[in-house]
């Protein structure tokens, strides 16, 4: 299975790290792109240094996962994910900033993450957005509704506690499990309610 993962500058880097590892663990071929703000958030939330250089962040984030992950520059429109002609099974933007929500909702495409998400919508392919912001303005809400109407799955980074979460990892797994479910990927990250 071929999956695009865009990482933008909303809080939630642990979701992105766990999702990437889970996709690779499930045998996916992953195309990864991280925005400039995404690099800053990964540096801050995973490695304790908001000023860590892009190459260093990407090496720590994906370097240990080998050939299953191909990393593309944020403006690399020669990437297969920039075109609907490439066969791609699913697209996820996790975490997804409100800036990216706003851009996508207008149809604008200022970087490869926007372009890949727009391709997913126009080709009627699975697009999962994992936004994180609170509270939300009417601008945010309208943008999210527009994207939902266009076919995106809005999978808010709002973990539930009903599985008896005890650790932050449990909460991270809750969201990652929902993402994998949306992509049709089997996992055992969380128990299934009623089973
Ligand atoms: C540490 C940090 C945390 C942030 N958290 C959020 C957030 O949770 N949600 C959000 O919409 N923006 C957040 N931002 C702001 C975005 O990074 C900013 O709007 C940026 O322009 C997003 O660009 P991008 O969508 O290209 O990544 C955060 C920024 C930083 C540095």
Image: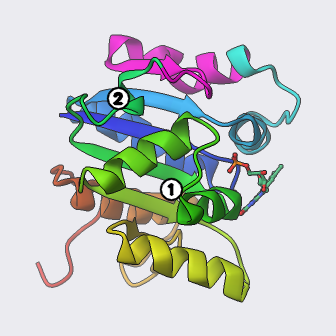
| 171 drawn magenta | no
Ligand number 1: quarter of image: bottom right
Say which residue appears at 32% left-offset and 68% top-offset: 151
Determine the image quadrant of residue 140.
Answer: bottom right
Determine the image quadrant of residue 148.
Answer: bottom left
Q: Is residue 10 left or right of residue 113?
A: right
What is the secondary structure assignment of the residue under circle 1?
Answer: helix
Reading the image, the residue beneath label 1 is 169
Reading the image, the residue beneath label 2 is 30
Instruction: Work out whether mark 1 precedes mark 2 in sequence or the reverse, and give the earlier one.
Output: 2
The quadrant of the image that shows the C terminus is bottom left
Q: Which of 100 and 182 is in front in this view?
A: 100
Q: Position of residue 106 (x, y in %)?
A: 58, 64
Q: Nearer the viewer, residue 117 or 46?
A: 117
Q: Which of 29 and 80 is in front in this view?
A: 80
In this view, the mark in front (1 or 2): 2
**Range covered by the magenta-colored residues:** 56-77
Q: Position of residue 154 (x, y in %)?
A: 43, 71
- Most extreme residue toward the left is 195
Residue 36's place in the image compared with 102, above or below, is above
- Categorize mark 1 by other alpha carbons within 10 Å: few (<14), some (14-19), many (20+): few
Say which residue appears at 42% left-offset and 63% top-offset: 175
- Most extreme residue toward the right is 51
What is the secondary structure assignment of the residue under circle 2?
Answer: strand
- Categorize mark 2 by other alpha carbons within 10 Å: few (<14), some (14-19), many (20+): many
Say which residue appears at 62% left-offset and 22% top-offset: 58
């Amino acid at each position: 299975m071929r999956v695009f993962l865009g990482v933008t500058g909303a809080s939630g880097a642990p979701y992105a790290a766990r999702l990437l590892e889970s996709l690779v663990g499930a045998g996916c071929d992953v195309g990864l792109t991280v925005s400039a703000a995404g690099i800053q958030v990964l540096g801050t939330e995973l490695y304790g240094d908001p000023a860590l250089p892009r190459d260093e962040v990407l090496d720590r984030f994906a370097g240990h996962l080998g050939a299953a992950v191909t990393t593309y520059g944020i403006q690399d429109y020669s990437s297969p994910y920039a075109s609907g002609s490439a066969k791609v099974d699913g697209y996820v933007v996790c975490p997804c900033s409100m800036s990216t929500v706003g851009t996508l909702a207008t149809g604008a495409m200022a970087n490869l993450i926007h372009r890949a998400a727009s391709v997913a919508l126009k080709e009627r392919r699975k697009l999962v957005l994992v936004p994180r912001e609170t509270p939300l303005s009417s601008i945010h809400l309208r943008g999210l509704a527009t994207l939902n109407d266009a076919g995106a799955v809005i999978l808010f980074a709002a973990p539930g506690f009903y599985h008896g979460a005890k650790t932050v990892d449990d909460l991270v797994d809750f969201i990652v499990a929902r993402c994998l479910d949306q992509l049709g990927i089997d996992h055992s990250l969380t128990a299934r309610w009623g089973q």
